[in-house]
Amino acid sequence: MSSTTDPNPTNIPLGHAYDGIHQYENPIPGWWKQLFVITVLIAPLYLLYFHVGAPGRSIQEQFQAAMDQNQRKKYADLPLLTADAATLMKFKDDVKWTEVGQVIFETNCASCHGAEGAGVIGPNLCDENYKHIKKITDITKVINEGVAGGAMPAWSTRIPNQNDIIMLSAYVASLRGTNPAKPKGPDGSPIAPWSADE
Amino acid sequence: MSQTSLTASESEALEQFSYDDAIVRLFVTATIFWGFVGTSIGVLVSVLLVMPSISDMFRSDIGAMLSFARLRPLHTNAAIFAFAGNAIFAAVYYSTQRLCKCSMWSWTLGRLHFWGWQAIIVVAAVTLPMGITQGKEYAEMEWPIDLAIAVVWTLFFGVNFMMTLLTRRERHLYVSLWFYIATIVTVTILHVFNNLVFPTGWSKSYSLFAGVQDALMQWWYGHNFIAFFMTIPFLGLMYYFLPKAADRPVYSYKLSIIHFWSLVFIYIWAGPHHLHYTALPEWASTLGMLFGVMLWMPSWGGMINGILTLRGAWHKVTTDPVLKFFVVGITFYGIATFEGPMLSIKSVNALSHYTDWTIAHAHSAALGWNGFMTFGMIYWLLPRLYQTKLWSTKMAEWHFWIGTIAILLYIIPIYAAGITQGLMWRSLKPNGDLMYSFLDSLQQIIPFWWTRVGAGSLYVFGVLMLAFNALMTWMSRPSKYDVPVYSVPRFSKTYDDPEIPKSGLAGTPVLELAAKLDALSKFDWHRRWERLPVRFTIAIMLAVLFASALELLPIFLIQSNIPTIATVKPYTPLELAGRDIYVAEGCYNCHSQMIRPMVAEKLMFGEFSKPGESIYDHPFQWGSRRIGPDLARIGVRQQSGLWHWKHFEHPSVISEGSVMPNYRHLLEERLNYQEIEKRVRAAQFLGATYAFDLKDSADVARKQAEKVTAEIITQGGPVEYNGHLTKDSTVIALIAYLQRVGTDLFKPEESAAPAPAQAPEARNTEARNTEAPMAVSISQ
């Protein structure tokens, strides 16, 4: 229980004192002012460069250019292929190209067939049993057209590049006989080994 | 309260008042309590990320609440509204009274504010885990809670604060008060506009805005909430408590003026930098970046003024834990406000966006700046509020060191995680193929997540030490608090401002303009403003509203900003119900629905998202973090209903290495078809058109559910589940929604012709993932 007078002493260097808090009139650091001005000046320059309609500078145009370049890389030294048995047989043993197929597989197929093709919801692709496939070209057919009431959808519309489909088919063919970590039980029935016969 | 005997003439000249410190004690206690709760939930969600299978151990309806996606909003909202909020209030109620030499205008409003705010937090803490959410980050609380926030914030807190300013006995407003005014005004504006919704019941509403517009509104809100709730009021706190604790004058008055106004003017513009490379028009994104970069120095103005105020008091820092907390807090503010502008640069953001980098950035600010400024303030306040010595200074020291180590242990691995994941996503093989799958990148960062569990626990331990110290200090309080009564001369109504000194350039041979600029830069005009709180408040409000209008209105009014796509149609009744589940479960906390125009993203997720694709999305669900893969094209990428069914049942079995928890409750629960008509009516109110009688909504939905289910059964799924038919499961609606997401863009224009009533049948039209964005028509 006490009574005091004004809680705020009033010795005032700058004419300001609030609850005993004083303020100096120190100068603002020069580098602070300069950087502030620079960050402001960047704005019109940036706008001039990117937003006055010069071609090729918008995000979408840059993306399109990069995408085109990316798409050219993969099949630069390959013609448009046909999915015949000989082609598939050739590419299934070519590691350089099964790696391409593997990426397509991991992006699109792994969610149902597992990253190693051991089967999850979709069947195991590493064993000797197949549900809708009798010969190597059936792989391409199933991928392109789909089976099982849409459980295996038609990928021809989703993967428009036919070479992609062929590399994917070749990779799937190459999975046969591999030993994944957790194989799903066999689906379908055993079929003859892959052959180049149509 | 004691009365002193004064003579009649004295009492005429003097006014008496005492400070309401009881309210400050309440807010400090609440701050500590919610600080513990908020950080503990943070640890809980960090554990759920590394051990998602925890929810498997519970009954599915209980386990549903133990998902990262439902609890993360609780963590963020508790940290912001409960912990930071109560800390702000404690600071405001303590300092405002002293800076204005008066008591709070209404002690009753103060109590209403306190209890109202705590009630809001409790209701939010109950409803968020139940999945009652608006689905927008930091604005998750449903509309009745939002109304309560508006009332408590504006009418109880704002009015009380402004009336206190108007009844003050200090002529000029000190810097802290400017920051408090800006906080109260701006938070009100942000909160009201971002929470404009169309309610369909007490626990469900739809944002009035959709897609691009909703996204812009949300990040205008989100960014500025970080500014005006987590930064501006804490700068006000710093300007009061730091010079008090250090007993040093503030370094520069002029700097405080410049950095205050530049923050107020610039902050509001910067929101769109949270939406770089999204479907937001590029000009808006550019504005967000340029103003974001401009914010660097205005933010550092506060840091400089804080750190340089300690000149001549550094020896005190070695012995005083309060100052230690402040120094490290301000340092983290400096780090975070350098990083913020850096992350707002598009090319940096291209790497950081959707990764843990953002999480590390947010936590260096929240744990370092907000946390440590709050702890410093509380340790300074405890002896003054409880009128005794702090129970243990040594323990406070320990809290400081443990907290600092915890922050570093948290942010360094999470920065590493963010950059790792960002780099892995964009890695391409020489032939242009993706180097890593999404799951590869996820597996790579899980060890970093484990260190976060430890670091977070350490930080919580620090908060517990604070709580214990506060409790012991409270125990040794006097039996009755001393409430001093102050007598000060009556505040005279009239006041003559000192003459503004003429510019030294006046009369010299320079342009008149130069002389005026010189006078302006001396800031004597600002001194006059400082005694006019109403004008000051209006100036802030105009600055904020002006910038907001310039940035938001074009997106809302000029149609070319969002080109419509002819094939994008409203969601069917069942899909709407499914989308509501998506929102309620908080899927956006882990999944984005916004593919950026980047090579790696296109290869990983599909065609980039277009502005016209989300025009029926109330609220937008673009997300801000990819703990799981992007879902903007999930309907194209995964059509199999059976896959979705099994994946919701056991995500990690279907997708090895996934950290998604199970959603068995969605399989076990039955969908409430009676609710569907309300949803469809809301969608129609918000702009969707339907060809069928809305009364038939439930039947239309049932038909589609049967079709979706038939497919699942054909593919080998169950006919019955948990005692009901598969088609009655809640999850069927969610699957229908997921099968639809991102497919409209590729539909041939003809299939747009059948009325949306037939949409369920039209749904299975094969999606076409072609290069050309088909059927995109731009209507001007």
Image (spheres, coloured by chain):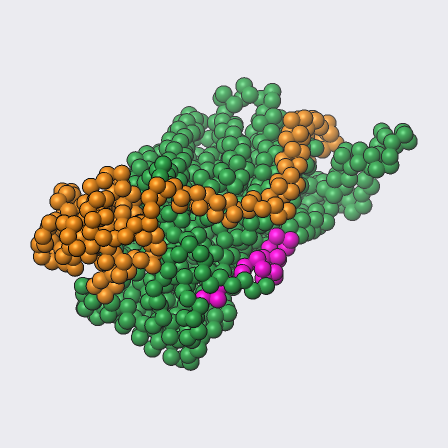
Q: In the image, A74: left or right of B156?
A: left
Report x, y in % for residue B603. Answer: 37, 47
Which residue is more in the foreground, B743 or B588? B743
Question: Is B566 covered by the magenta stretch?
Answer: yes
Image vertical order of residue B241 relative to residue A165, above or below: above
Which chain comes out green in the rendered image?
Answer: B
The colour of chain A is orange
Image location of residue A129, percent across then percent down: 11, 53
Residue drawn at point x = 44 percent, y = 68 percent: B749
Image position, residue B526 (x, y; %) = 74, 40
**Nearest the camera: A46 or B751?**
B751
Residue under the image location 49 percent in, 21 percent down: B319
Q: Quadrant of the C terminus of chain B?
A: bottom right
Q: Main secondary structure of the magenta part?
A: helix
Position of B171 with respect to A99 (left or right) is right
Which of the two residues, A54 or B69, is positioned nearer the viewer here? A54
Quick check: B216 above or below B752?
above
Is A155 a magenta residue?
no
> For the point 61% across and 61% down, which residue is it?
B557
